[in-house]
Structure formats: structure tokens, C-alpha cells
Amino acid sequence: MKGRDSISEGGLSELRREFRGERGDLIPVLQRVQEIQGYLRPEAIRIVSRWLKISENEIFGVATFYAQFRFHPPGLHHLRVCLGTACHVRGGEQILLTAQQRLGVDTGETTPDGKYDLDRVACLGCCALAPVVAFDQKVHSQMSVLKIQRILDEHKSA
Ligand code: FES
């Protein structure tokens, strides 16, 4: 049985050194797996399942509860729309809806061409500039429906 539950595939071996391998490690382990691999691959869930002795179904159930986890490869560009309180009350939902329509994807999805993915986040740490979106590494403040349309249209045609 030795090695069957080892974290050795896909660059996950370092997790053995970072965590004790207990049930309570599940969320931080999944966060690290996603950090390393970009998303939660079925093989990674299987490996974590064996290591932490938690069924794959349970891991999948826990991971789907949290919006932060992805089950498909991330897109080339990341659009994150903040829906924290400050951004929400200043029209964040409308901006998210516009981005969904413009990109043709739902939150947490990637466009079929693999170019963009769309996520909602709880706070980008600059509430005074709400509503805010982050497009790749750049934060755009005081957003509006027109501004998000313009950013996406300009980027798509670049
Ligand atoms: S709530 Fe949006 S940046 Fe804080």
C-alpha cells in the first residue's frame, strides 16, 4: 500500500512538507493545489482524497461550496468583479451582469476560446474606490456598466 496515498503527482509532493495530512487541512490543501496547478484537476482531488482519507465526493462537495475553487483550467485573462458590501451597494451586481453578457459566460466560467475567465470576489481591498474590478493585475476603480463594456471591447479588439 506504500505510495498509494502519496502526494507525488503533478508537482504536489511539496504539500507533504507543508501540511500534516489531517482532515482539517482540506481547505488550505485545496487552496495550495489550485495555486500550484491553476485549478482542481480530478487527479488532484483523487490524490488529496487518499492522503487526507476524505472521499472524493466529500471533497468535491466542500470545494463546490466555495466560489474560490475552479474545476477547469483558468483562462488567459482574469476578470474579477468585486461584490463586497461597498462595491455591491454601488452597482457591482450590474457590472458583473454586464461582464457575463459581454463575455458570454457565467461567474466561475472560462470563455470557450480559453481567453477570459470571470469571477466574483468578496473585496479587493480598495473599498473607497468602489465599485471595483480587477482585470489581470490591474485594478479599475469607480466602475460603471459603460466602463466595463469599454474595457472588454478594447481588450477583445486589441
Ligand atoms: S468591497 Fe469592493 S473593494 Fe472592498
Image (cartoon, rainbow, N blue to C red):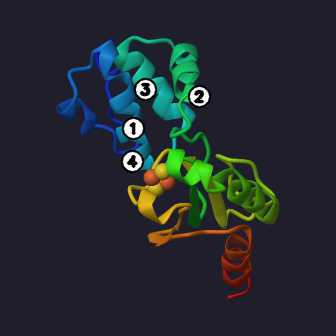
The amino acid at mark 4 is: Glu
Q: Nearer the viewer, mark 2 or mark 4?
A: 2
- Image side of residue 22 versus residue 43, left or right: left
As displayed, is residue 64 above or below residue 157? above
2 or 4: tag closer to the N-terminus: 4
Q: Residue at x 56, y 62 (%)?
A: 78
The amino acid at mark 2 is: Thr
Q: Which residue in the structure is indicated by mark 3? A: 47
Q: Nearer the viewer, mark 2 or mark 3?
A: 2
1 or 2: tag closer to the N-terminus: 1
Dot 2 crowding, Cα within 10 Å, few <14, some 14–19, many 20+: few
Q: Which residue in the structure is indicated by mark 1? A: 31
- Which secondary structure, mark 2? helix
Q: CA distance from mark 2 to mark 3?
A: 18 Å
Q: Which residue in the structure is indicated by mark 4? A: 35
Q: What mark, if any, has residue 64 been given in the picture?
A: 2
- Image side of residue 90 versus residue 139, left or right: right
- Which secondary structure, mark 3? helix
The amino acid at mark 3 is: Ile
CB within 8 Å, label 4 to label 1:
yes
Q: CA distance from mark 2 to mark 4?
A: 17 Å
